[in-house]
Image (cartoon, rainbow, N blue to C red):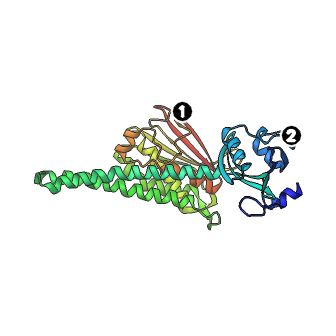
Amino acid sequence: MQKLLQMKTGRDDIININIYNNVIIIDKNARVLSHNTSVLKLFGVLESVEQKNVLVLNRTKEFENAVALALEGRHNEKIITVGERVCNLYLNPVFDDEKIAGAIIVVTDVTEKEKREHLRREFSANVSHELKTPLTSISGIAEIIKSGIVETKDVPEFAGKIHKEASRLITLVEDIIKVSQLDEADTTVEKERVNLYELSGEVLEQLEPVAKLNAIRLSLMGEDIAIVGVKSIIREMIFNLCDNAIKYNKPEGEVIVKVKLDENKRSYIEVKDTGIGIASDQQDRIFERFYRVDKSHSKEIGGTGLGLSIVKHGAILHGADIIVDSKLEYGTRIRVTF
């Protein structure tokens, strides 16, 4: 084995086994000469596989083909799925007097990286779609006005539609920026004492005019409770919870905000409404970016589908837990515990 480790690889590199966590060394017959214990854990194997065919670790066609290429003298890389994990394989052939002596396989767990990349692609696709919708509407209306077929008396109506779509676009861009900032948030960002009760009162006062348009009653219960956090982000979390509770409420409904300590002396803020509610099979998805429970209603009220995503990211930054309790037609209760 020591001789095999010192031999040159197919890429003219010298592999140092100590710098990798997950390494498998095989001979020219694909028998395992050595491996790290972490490899077994990654592949879900309970006992050593030394002197066994390397395919006992993973019998997928992708793994088999990658090993075969390495033993033909060709360096290759391959992404494979191992249970719920995603692994990147780096396979280097090892030569002895220009003959294949075996191969070294480096396995890297890239599950989290792949998840982030998937979210990035999904986010980019969603952003493109969401931005295109209001822009297409604005462009279409402007073209109609430009053509001169709109009567003078109808111009204010068309201008109003442009203003509505432009406002929706601005809100969307602002929310996208907020989510992006939270994605890149520095965990060492300066924190301060934040009074949840006072901050909730300020948010409700800000939202009072919107609530009055739909005759929705706002109320605040609880006590002065302070936590250490980023005030601007906590304000944004409270605002989005309350804003959603108003938007997805029923006429003459109610929004109750509570700020209290739970049985474990942890501080929490709870927002409860008497709105349309959320179906049980959708409650796990409401914090996804751009996810909307009622797409037609969201479009009508100008929802961007990013409000609860901002709440989720803010909770992660503060190490907070979120509980959702909702029933269709009876309303929703969301509690954030710090």
- Which amino acid type is shown beneath numbered disc 1? Asp
Residue closer to the observer: 34 or 306: 34
Q: Is residue 305 above or below residue 280?
A: below
Instruction: Please name whichever residue, 102 or 81, is drawn nearer the observer in this view of the structure.
Output: 102
Q: Which residue lies under the disc numbered 2?
A: 47
Task: Residue 325 in the image: state x and y as whole percent.
Answer: 56, 37
The N terminus lies in quadrant: bottom right
Q: Which residue is labeled 1 in the image?
A: 281
Mark 1 or 2, closer to the camera: 2
326, 49: nearer the viewer: 49
Classify 10 Å Cα crowding around label 2: few (below 14), some (14-19), many (20 and above). few
Secondary structure of the residue carrying tag 1 is helix
**Label 1 or label 2, whichever comes before in sequence order:** 2
Q: Position of residue 209 (x, y in %)?
A: 37, 52
Image location of residue 248, percent across then percent down: 43, 41
Q: Residue at x 83, y 44 (%)?
A: 31
Query: Is residue 276 placed above or below 12 in the rendered structure?
Result: above
Amino acid at dot 2:
Glu
Residue plotted at (74% across, 39% down): 58
